[in-house]
Image (cartoon, rainbow, N blue to C red):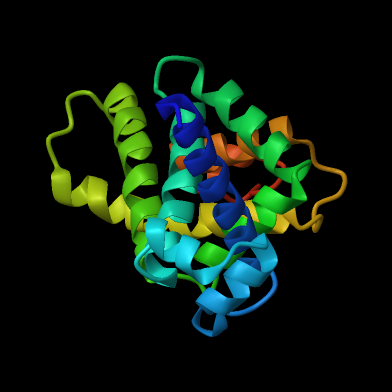
């Protein structure tokens, strides 16, 4: 059999197993997913599964790699960060399968390994923006603490927006609001919202 045909078949099988795993992750807790579940969903026998993956966890790693690579493909640090984030959030909101996968992997019943990888990735982006706005700052501890402070809030806001808890706010408005909060704090949102901000000389 030609090597090209073999490679296509391998790729087809891996994609089928990955897609089946993604569907199952969105439906049930990770700890309850078995090789039998994956094979039944992908319509592939167990012996074929073990040709490609050692166990469910090794397939889970492949799915997580797929999710991380997707993010990296959208945030290469070369374009406009504002536009990149707006496009990414818009696509996530309009793609329920991908959105549900991220929620499942990073949620309370998700995989801590994926959450750590996601945090490392977002910290790299945060660090680039930090250096752009505070190029003379050499305080690594301060940078880490600020990230620890803003990261949970950003995740919470994204989750609320992606689950339609802010139906009248566009992706552009959301990212603009977050930029103001991160760069200027709550008082940067405007005097109308915080009229007491400058009441004392």
Residue at 55%, 84% in the rendered image:
32
Does any portion of residue 198 appear in the rendered image? Answer: no
Does any portion of residue 3 appear in the rendered image? Answer: yes
Q: Nearer the viewer, residue 97 or 14?
A: 14
- Residue 89 versus residue 38 in the image, above or below: above
**Residue 170 image offset from top left, x and y in percent:** 78, 36
- Residue 172 versus residue 181 in the image, above or below: above
Q: Nearer the viewer, residue 115 or 66?
A: 66
Residue at 36%, 44% in the rendered image:
121
**Residue 93 image offset from top left, x and y in percent:** 75, 44
Q: Nearer the viewer, residue 16 or 89?
A: 16
The answer to whether 66 appears left or right of 98 in the picture is: left
Q: Residue furthest top?
A: 79
**Residue 77 image offset from top left, x and y in percent:** 39, 22
Residue at 60%, 22% in the rendered image:
83
The quadrant the C terminus occupies is top left
Q: Nearer the viewer, residue 200 or 155?
A: 155
Residue 175 lies in quadrant: top right
Q: Residue furthest bottom?
A: 32
Residue at 54%, 35% in the rendered image:
179
Question: Count of labels shown?
Answer: 0
Residue 57 lies in quadrant: bottom left
Q: Residue furthest right?
A: 168
Q: Residue furthest front?
A: 1
**Residue 26 image offset from top left, x and y in percent:** 67, 66
- Residue 158 versus residue 104 in the image, above or below: above
């Amino acid at each position: 059999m030609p090597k090209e045909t073999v490679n296509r078949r391998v790729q087809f099988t891996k994609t089928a197993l990955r897609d089946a795993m993604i569907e199952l992750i969105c439906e049930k807790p990770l700890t309850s997913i078995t090789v039998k579940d994956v094979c039944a969903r992908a319509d592939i026998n167990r012996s074929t599964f073990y040709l490609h993956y050692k166990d469910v966890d090794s397939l889970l790693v492949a799915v997580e790699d797929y999710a991380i690579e997707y993010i990296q493909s959208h945030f290469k640090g070369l374009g406009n960060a504002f536009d990149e984030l707006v496009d990414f959030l818009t696509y996530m909101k309009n793609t329920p399968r991908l959105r549900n996968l991220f929620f499942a992997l990073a949620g309370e019943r998700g995989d801590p390994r994926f959450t750590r990888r996601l945090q490392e990735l977002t910290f790299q982006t945060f660090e680039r923006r930090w250096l752009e706005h505070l190029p003379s700052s050499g305080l690594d501890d301060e940078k880490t603490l600020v990230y620890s402070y803003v990261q949970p809030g950003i995740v919470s806001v994204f989750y609320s927006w992606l689950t339609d808890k802010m139906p009248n706010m566009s992706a552009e408005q959301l990212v603009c609001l977050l930029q103001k909060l991160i760069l200027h704090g709550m008082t940067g949102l405007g005097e109308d919202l915080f009229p007491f901000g400058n009441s004392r000389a």
